[in-house]
Image: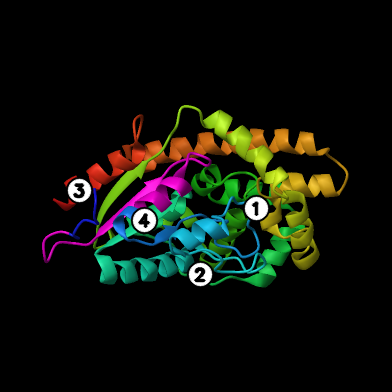
Amino acid sequence: MNHPPSPGPKGEQPLVIALLGPTASGKTALGIALAQALDLAVLSVDSRQLYQEMNIGTAKPTPAQRAAVRHELLDLRRPDQPINLQEFRADAERAIAAEHARRGIALLVGGSGLYLKAITQGMSPPAVPPQPQLRAQLEALGQPLCHQLLLSADPTAGARIMTNDAVRTQRALEVIYATGLPLSSQQGAAPPPWRVLELGLNPPDLKQRISQRSAQLFADGLVEETRGLVERYGAECPLLNTIGYGEAKAVLRGELQEGEAIALTTKRTQQFAKRQRTWFRRQHEPLWLDGGDPLQQALQAIERVLG
């Protein structure tokens, strides 16, 4: 494809392309290549890259990559200012509307399945504002107990939310305490007014990619990045318990050697990728780009949709 495609016949619904896949599957590079080929911005759908200063540990696009194409939905909040799903969806829909007004097409790139589902399938989370006092109490209880509380109060949400995901656990409990109803019973869906084309990456060498990525994060300075984040936002900031940052904190405390931290980060990331694969298989229906040239496969699929 030598030039960007037209958005399609007049009056047809605008298109949203969603490039999804597990962590370290190559979404960033392919997303940039697609954005360049189609004259689009990359709209990031990553639940950690939306936070400022968390650059190395989230494998956020580099300054050079961000200079190559415009990226949106990065660096929306500070790490101590959590954003909920409803707020992110509103930001994403504004970014999508801007791209539709400009090109008739928008490109989502990311691996955060729940966020992608909320955008592409119109899932509507409950409108419950953050409650800092309750969150402080939940943090004091500790994540293991909070997750057990969630499993008791809302088994569906508890089974879906990872045991170490303090942010989503607290949000689910917050909704329960505010409304008296389980979060899982309040998540309706209204399909958005777009056509959606889902493209998936799931490379066979994902384990090797994850191993290399984990080592590179520490080589790039993850421990020092974590030190700075701890100094600014405190060691108990929930986002600093997520994959990579939790292991880097253990290095700073002298509990792990760097090699041990890399091995543990690799293991946790592989477990996370397995859960992502399961989610995408059950919750989405992407065209999997397997073998050959994924960029050409993606462009051909987009041409077919646009007619």
Q: Which residue type does callout 4 highlight?
A: Ala
The magenta span reads 8-35
Looking at marks 3 and 1 on the same chain, the residue that comes earlier in the sequence is marked by 1
Q: Tell me the CA gap for discs 3 and 1.
A: 35 Å
Query: Who comes first in sequence, dot 1 or dot 4?
Result: 4
Q: What residue is rendered at 46% in x and 56% in y?
A: 45
- Earlier in the chain: of badge 1 and badge 2, it is 1
Mark 1 neighbour density, 10 Å: few (under 14) some (14–19) many (20 or more) = many
Is 141 left or right of 153, judged from the image as shown? right
Residue behind mark 3: 303
Q: Decide if residue 276 is in sight here.
A: yes
| Residue under pointer 1 | 56
State whether residue 293 is above or below residue 113: above
Q: Is residue 22 magenta?
A: yes
Q: Is residue 189 visible?
A: no
Question: Is 29 left, or right, of 230 in this rendering?
Answer: left
Q: Say which residue label 2 marks.
A: 128
